[in-house]
């Protein structure tokens, strides 16, 4: 379980995983709303799993930009979570190894060489 909060994840997988989690959560929420059977325990379980995996993804994304995973707790402050989400979608991660692990870009050297020629 500790490995879920270690390492790094870059912008595109972060976006994909956020979208998948949101889609699954929306489907379960819709199921709970339209089903006449009381499914509040399913909704609570889904909410807990969603929160856990969302925190894991967010911590690893903060690691990619060389920030502590404790920044994830700022999501608890209204409106600040939205700003942080937008920031995590657009801020490029470190192209080198940082204290949270090696770079997740396979072509980091190629990207840095290509960007240096544009000057």
Image: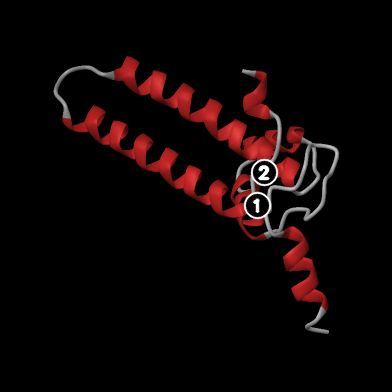
Would residue 50 appear left or right of 12 to someone viewing this image?
left
Residue name at image x 44 percent, y 47 percent = 19
Decide which of 96, 31 is in the foreground and name it: 96
Q: Quadrant of residue 41?
A: top left
Which callout, 1 or 2, points to the residue nearer the camera?
A: 2
Residue name at image x 40 percent, y 24 percent = 46
User: How far from the left and from the top, in percent, is residue 111?
Assistant: 73, 67
User: How far from the left and from the top, in percent, is residue 88?
Assistant: 65, 52
Q: Tell me the number on the disc at residue 88.
A: 1
Decide which of 77, 47 is in the foreground and name it: 47
Q: Earlier in the sequence, mark 1 or mark 2?
A: 2
Q: Which quarter of the rendering shows the C terminus?
A: bottom right
Q: Which quarter of the rendering shows the N terminus?
A: top right
Q: Quick one: label 2, few (<14), some, or many (20+) residues within 10 Å?
A: many
Q: Is residue 50 above or below residue 65?
A: above
Q: Quick one: label 1, few (<14), some, or many (20+) residues within 10 Å?
A: many
Q: Residue furthest bottom?
A: 119
Proximity of marks 1 and 2: CB atoms separated by less than 8 Å: yes
Question: SS of the residue at dot 2?
Answer: helix
Q: Is residue 104 above or below residue 110?
A: above
| Spatial separation of the CA atoms under disc 1 and disc 2 | 7 Å
Q: Tell me the number on the disc at residue 61.
A: 2
């Amino acid at each position: 379980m500790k490995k879920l909060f270690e390492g790094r994840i870059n912008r595109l997988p972060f976006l994909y995983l956020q979208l998948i989690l949101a889609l699954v959560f929306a489907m379960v929420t819709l199921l709970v709303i339209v089903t006449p059977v009381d499914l509040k325990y399913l909704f609570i379980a889904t909410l807990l799993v969603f929160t856990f995996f969302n925190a894991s993804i967010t911590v690893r994304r903060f690691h990619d930009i060389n920030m502590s995973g404790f920044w994830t707790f700022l999501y608890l402050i209204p409106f600040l979570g939205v700003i942080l989400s937008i920031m995590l979608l657009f801020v490029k991660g470190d192209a080198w190894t940082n204290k949270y692990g090696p770079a997740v870009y396979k072509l980091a050297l190629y990207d840095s060489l290509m960007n240096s020629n544009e000057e």
